[in-house]
Amino acid sequence: MVFPLGVLFTVGVNSASALDVKAGPIWSNEDAQVKCPVATAAVGGIWNGHWTTTEWGVMSVCGVNNVKAGPIWNNNDAKRKCIVAATAAGGTWNGHWTTTEWGVMSVCGVN
């Protein structure tokens, strides 16, 4: 079965929440534009553009909706790989996944 790139797959679970990744203090949106992509990439995540300060001057978090998982070939493969990728990032797989580059990379939804 061939799927077009960017098709979203869901395996039995729904969720709209995101995973928060600690990034140290963030002082402004401009600062977040630098720090969040780095912090989220460190856990295999892709920054969703959201951030918030959790403790002023000490800690902020950056939102992640998806983590990279390498190529995923089908829903059964996603069930194996996405749980591992989400857990490694400190999150929980939400049942969603999509191929971003056929045969090379897929991402798994996390919260």
Image: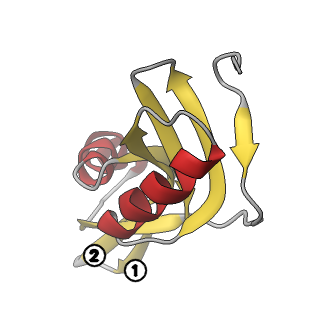
Q: Are marks 1 and 2 in contact (CB under 8 Å)?
A: yes
Which residue is found at the position 72% from the left and 37% from the top? 8
Is disc 2 placed on a helix, strand or loop?
A: strand
Q: Of 1 and 57, which appears nearest the observer?
A: 1
In the picture of the structure, the residue carrying the numbered disc 1 is 54
Q: Is residue 25 above or below residue 103?
A: below
Which residue is found at the position 77% from the left and 63% from the top? 12
- Amino acid type at mark 2: Met
Q: Is residue 67 left or right of residue 100?
A: left
Q: Of 92 and 23, which appears nearest the observer?
A: 92
Which residue is found at the position 65% from the left and 67% from the top? 17
| Mark sitting earlier along the chain (1/2) | 1
How many numbered markers are drawn? Answer: 2
**Number of residues whose C-alpha sits closer than 10 Å to that of mark 2, classed few (under 14), some (14–19) or many (20 or more):** some
Is disc 1 placed on a helix, strand or loop?
A: strand
Quadrant location of residue 60? bottom left
Q: Pinpoint residue 47: horizontal percent, then vertical percent.
A: 44, 46
Q: Is residue 98 above or below residue 11?
A: above
Q: Of 14 and 80, which appears nearest the observer?
A: 80
Which residue is found at the position 22% from the left and 51% from the top? 42
In the picture of the structure, the residue carrying the numbered disc 2 is 59
State the CA–CA distance, disc 1 to disc 2. Answer: 6 Å
Quarter placement of the C terminus: bottom right
Q: How is the image coloured?
A: secondary structure
- Amino acid type at mark 1: Thr
**Residue 62 — which label?**
none
**Number of residues whose C-alpha sits closer than 10 Å to that of mark 1, classed few (under 14), some (14–19) or many (20 or more):** some
Quadrant location of residue 1? top right
Q: Is residue 73 left or right of residue 35?
A: right
Q: Pinpoint residue 9: horizontal percent, then vertical percent.
A: 72, 42
